[in-house]
Image (spheres, rainbow, N blue to C red):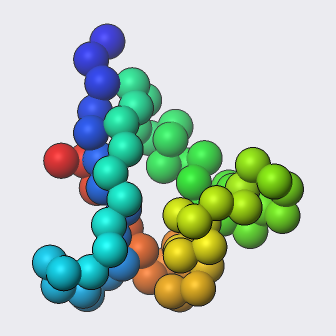
Amino acid sequence: MRGIIYCIKQKGTGFDSPIYIGSTKNFKKRELAYKDNINCKTKECNTKLYKYINNNGGWDRNRCNPL
């Protein structure tokens, strides 16, 4: 199976806003993992990405799109 490159970006923002680029072999599974971990309080979930998403409207205000 080939991998997929994806980006996570806040909805309704321009090209100059921060984005996250990642890759996975199973896009749907990875997207669900992000959604499940968004309110996680463990060390593994305490990353810049999750902090950014939580501080900018949560998962409903961000999107994960394959490139």
Q: Is residue 2 above or below residue 12?
A: above
Image coordinates for residue 67, horizontal then vertical, percent: 18, 47
- Residue 1 vs residue 14, the one in the foreground: 14
In the rendered view, tell whether residue 35 sits above or below residue 54: above
42 vs 12, left or right, is right
- Is the residue 7 above or below the residue 9 in the image? above
**Would you place residue 36 above or below residue 39 in this image?**
above
Give the residue displayed 53% in from the left and 64% down from the top.
49
Looking at this view, name the residue that lies furthest to the right.
42
Answer with the quarter of the image where residue 22 lies.
Answer: top left
Position in image of residue 39 (x %, y %): 74, 68
**In the image, residue 33 lies at what x, y percent?**
60, 47
- Is 22 placed left or right of 32 in the picture? left
Residue at 57% in and 65% down: 48
Left or right? Give the position of 41 relative to 26: right
Q: Residue at x 36, y 78 (%)?
A: 10
Split into 4 quadrants, where in the image is the N terminus? top left
What residue appears at the point 57 percent right and 54 percent down from the top-left corner? Answer: 34
Q: Measured from the top left, where is residue 50 in percent x and y?
A: 60, 66
Q: Residue furthest top?
A: 1
| Count of numbered tags | 0
Among the 4 quarters of the image, the one containing residue 17: bottom left
